[in-house]
Image: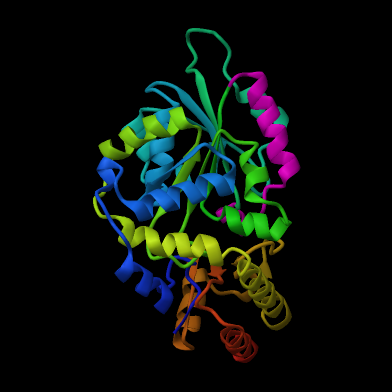
Amino acid sequence: MIDLRSDTVTKPTAEMRQLMAEAIVGDDVYGEDPTINELESYAANLFGKEKALFMTSGTQGNIAAILTHTRPGQEVIMDDESHVFLYEGAGASAFGGIQPRALRHNRGQIPIDDLEKAIRGKDIHFPETALIWLENSHNRSGGSILPLSYVREVHELAKAYNIPVHVDGARIFNAAVGSNTSVKEYAQCADTVQFCLSKGLGAPVGSILVGNETFIAHARKKRKMLGGGLRQSGVIAAPGLHGLKTGIHRLAEDHEHAKMLAKAVEDFTPCEVIHPVETNIVLIDTKESGKSASEWLALLNEKGVLAVAFAPTIIRLTTHLDISKDDIQSVITILKKLDV
C-alpha cells in the first residue's frame, strides 16, 4: 500500500534502529539520560532558546505549554481550526481549565485587528487573556505556511499587551523549508514552540517543547503530572536526534511530491485542490466528482492507496519520508485511470 494518510506513519530507518539499540541511557527523571540531554541541548540551540524538554507527543507538549503559561479560568486565543482546538481531546480545558477563544482565520492567520479586539479588557466579568496560540504549518489549511512577517506582527501585538505567544509547530520544519526561513527566526517571534520529531523527520515517537530556562523548569513538572516523566528514554530520543541532524532539508522532496500530486488531481480528476500546496499536505474537494470523501477513499484503497477524510467531501493526502518519487508516479497513474 502507498500510505498517504499522514506523515506519522513512517517507519524508523535501519540507521535509526541501530542508534536506538546502541543509545547510551540513564534515568531521565533524574536528568541522567545522556541521549535525552544531548537531544534537548541540540533542539534548544537549533531554535535559539535557552532550554528544551522532550515530550512523548505533540499533544503532551501543547498541554504542558498551556498548563505552564496559564491558570484555570483564563483564556487562550487561537484559530477555530487549530489542532489544539479540534484534535487534542479538549485537554486544554479538561486539564488546564482554560477557555479557548476560537477566531476565524485565513490559512491559519487570524487578522491582526481581530486578534487585538479579542484581547480581554480589565472588566471583572471577563476572563483574562493569558496566551496567543499559532499553528505553523497549518494542518486544516492544507499545510499552509504562516509567513514570518505575520508571525512578527502577532509577536509585536502580544508584546504590547504583555501576552506570551506559543507556536504549535508540529510541522514547523516543513514551514521553514517551504518558506526558506530558519526555525530560529520563527522562534524569535514566540515565547515557546512545540515541534514533532515523528512528523516529517521519521522518528517513531516524540516531540520537543522549547522556551526559556524558567518556563522549561516549570513545564518539566507539568510533564511529570501528565505522566511524561520517563526513565531510560534515550532509546527513543536517539532517532529523534538523528532526524533533527539529517532530515530537515530532505523535506523539500516531500513538498515537491505533494505538488506533483496536486497537479495530477487537477489534470486528471474532476476534484479541486482547495489550498495552494506549500508543504507536504494536499486537501482535495471531491464535490464536483459527485462522490463523497468516503467513496473516494474506497476507490483509492482498491488501487492500493491510503488517504484520510477531512470532511464529507474533503480528503487529505500527505507525503513523507517513506513515499518515493516512484510511489508518486504510481499514484498519478492510478488517478489517470480512475473511472470517476
State the quadrant of the N terminus: bottom left
The residue furthest right is 149
Q: Nearer the viewer, residue 36 or 114?
A: 36
Task: Give the residue displayed 52% in from the left and 36% down from the top.
Answer: 50
Magenta residue check for 77? no
Task: Give the residue displayed 47% in from the left and 54% down from the top.
Answer: 196
Quarter assignment of residue 96? top left
Task: Give the residue displayed 49% in from the left and 88% down from the top.
Answer: 303
Q: How many marks?
A: 0
Q: Is residue 136 above or below residue 226?
A: below
Protein image colouring: rainbow
Q: What segment carries the magenta color?
A: 138-162
User: Residue 11: x percent and y percent?
Assistant: 40, 74
Q: Is residue 165 above or below residue 147?
A: above
User: Residue 264: x percent and y percent?
Assistant: 69, 80
Quarter assignment of residue 302? bottom left
| Residue 139 in sight in this render | yes
User: Residue 257: x percent and y percent?
Assistant: 64, 75
Q: Is residue 66 above or below residue 284?
A: above
| Residue 315 in sight in this render | no
Q: Is residue 118 above or below residue 151?
A: above
State the quadrant of the C terminus: bottom right
Left or right: residue 118 versus residue 4 is: right
User: Residue 219: x percent and y percent?
Assistant: 38, 34
Magenta residue check for 155? yes
- Principal secondary structure, stretch drawn in magenta: helix
Quarter assignment of residue 164? top right
